[in-house]
Image (spheres, rainbow, N blue to C red):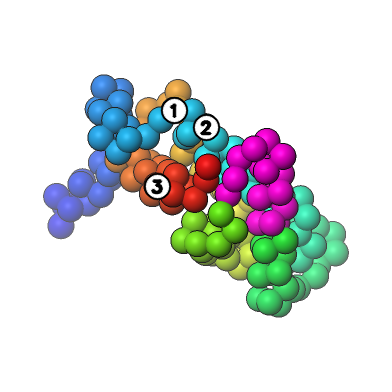
Amino acid sequence: MKHSMENFFNWIMKPIPEEEVEIWFNVNNMHFEKIELFGDIFKTLDFLIKSTYLGGGRGETVIYLTEENNLSHFDWCWLKLIDNFVKEKIYIEKSGEHKDYFLDFYKESFYSSTDNQNNNDINAFLNNIFDLDKPFSKSDLEILTQIYKLLDKNVS
């Protein structure tokens, strides 16, 4: 049991040497410019969702929205995101597994929570996962690679 906990801790926390990170990026055909672009897409979606959401106990007035309202809000933000990036000649597919990933992410981390701490946690997650200047753990690389591959297939 101790050995498996140590492996889990290393997967979550232990920094991988920079040379190994570069090899990981090369093996997975990941490019720095695209990582930055995909980070901008995710961060823009995050900004749109948080800045336009009226539900939950996040402000002085508590408004509880239904799951259907939350889905409508996400869809509106998603289409706004796509429209914003089209203006920059960056095209994001309207539907697919990338949209499903982001919807599931925000259902779990944002829409289902009334805790403002989750907003800070999401910001920390986004800033951490797309920060190319910090050490990466194995879990960071796996999450970044998953997001990269989803967006790489659906962004042109």
Residue 59, above or below 153: below
Q: Quadrant of the N terminus?
A: bottom left
Is 65 a magenta residue?
no
Q: Position of residue 103 (x, y in %)?
A: 56, 62
Is 79 a magenta residue?
yes
**Which kind of residue does numbered mark 1 sit on?**
Phe
Residue 56 picture quarter: bottom right
Q: Secondary structure at mark 3?
A: helix
- Mark 3 touches mark 2? (CB < 8 Å): no
The residues colored magenta run 77-92
Q: Position of residue 101 (x, y in %)?
A: 49, 59
Q: Secondary structure at mark 2?
A: helix
Q: Determine crowd level at label 1: few under 14, some 14-19, many 20+ residues with C-alpha closer than 10 A.
A: few
Q: Earlier in the sequence, mark 3 or mark 1?
A: 1
Tell me the number on the disc at residue 89.
none
Q: Which residue is mark 2?
A: 36
Tell me the number on the disc at residue 149.
3
Q: Residue at x 30, y 26 (%)?
A: 22
- Mark 1 touches mark 2? (CB < 8 Å): yes
Residue 52 picture quarter: bottom right
**Which kind of residue does numbered mark 2 sit on?**
Glu
Along the horizontal axis of the image, is 42 left or right of 55? left
Q: Position of residue 83 (x, y in %)?
A: 71, 49
* Viewer-nearest residue: 99 or 117: 99
Q: Earlier in the sequence, mark 3 or mark 2?
A: 2
Q: Which residue is mark 1?
A: 32
Along the horizontal axis of the image, is 72 left or right of 154? right
Q: Determine crowd level at label 3: few under 14, some 14-19, many 20+ residues with C-alpha closer than 10 A.
A: some
For the residues labelled 3 and 2, the Cα–Cα distance comes to 14 Å
